[in-house]
Amino acid sequence: MEYHTELLVFANWSTLLVCMVLKFPQIVSIMAARSAEGVSLNSVLLEITGFIVFLRYQIYYDYPMETYLEYPILIAQDAILLLFIFHYCASLKNAMPYAGIFFAMWNLLVLHKWIIDLALNLCTVISASSKFLQLQYLWQTKDSGNASALTWALASYTCGTRIFTTLLTTGDNAVLLRFVVMLILNIWVTVAILKYRKKTKKVD
């Protein structure tokens, strides 16, 4: 039992530490190239939507904070990533409507229990869709551009640790399913980025 407790503490803290820098390789890659080529805007938008729903669900059911503490950090990093994508691909003004939508969604999710429960089930579909959009982008362009394999590999690690922590803490099947699906897709995207990386690109 003590052995499991130590593993749980390690999994929680290592996940938090990894997530604190999870998006940095991607952000730095975009800043260095001054281009968001290889990164799907729709994928990031869906990803941050999934993060918001998942965080709201955890708070609503009063789950242990250590099992979701990384999500505010991930949302903040995705918001920064979105700003860079809008800066290089469109206009920063285009980001304002999305900020309003996310704020409204945060409040609407907890109006009724059935809404937040349904939202979590949809959250898995939304998050999976974000990964498929990134995969589709890679398949179509056959070029990973400035997409960071390290970011996706780290995301795979955090999904693996969250499968473990969920099994030992809440045992929530809906949450567990989400992390299993995300683990598979994150690994898939990582492999695709490495496959379509141009030989002249530097390894992350």
Image (spheres, rainbow, N blue to C red):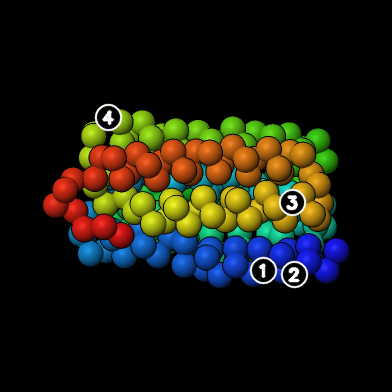
Q: Which residue is mark 4?
A: 140
Taking depth in this image into account, of 80 and 103 the one nearest to the observer is 80
Q: Secondary structure at mark 3?
A: helix
Q: Position of residue 117 (x, y in %)?
A: 77, 38
Q: Position of residue 62 (x, y in %)?
A: 82, 57
- Is the Cβ of the residue at disc 2 closer than 8 Å to that at disc 1? yes
Res 127 visible? no
Res 185 visible? yes
Q: Quadrant of the C terminus?
A: bottom left
The amino acid sitting under disc 4 is Gln
Of badges 3 and 4, the one in the foreground is 3
Q: Position of residue 3 (x, y in %)?
A: 78, 66
Q: Which residue is mark 3?
A: 166
Could you give the CA–CA distance between mark 4 and mark 1, rounded to whole angstroms?
Answer: 39 Å
Give the mark, 1 or 3, whose residue is nearer the N terminus.
1
The numbered mark at residue 6 is: 2
Neighbours of disc 3 within 10 Å: few (<14), some (14-19), many (20+): some
The amino acid sitting under disc 3 is Thr
Could you give the CA–CA distance between mark 1 and mark 3, rounded to whole angstroms?
Answer: 14 Å
From the viewer's perspective, is 61 left or right of 35? right
Relative to 105, residue 11 above or below:
below
Taking depth in this image into account, of 70 and 49 the one nearest to the observer is 70
Could you give the CA–CA distance between mark 4 and mark 2, rounded to whole angstroms?
Answer: 45 Å
Q: Secondary structure at mark 4?
A: helix
The numbered mark at residue 162 is: none
- Is the Cβ of the residue at disc 2 closer than 8 Å to that at disc 3? no
From the viewer's perspective, is 167 left or right of 85? right
Q: Which residue is mark 1?
A: 10
Neighbours of disc 4 within 10 Å: few (<14), some (14-19), many (20+): few
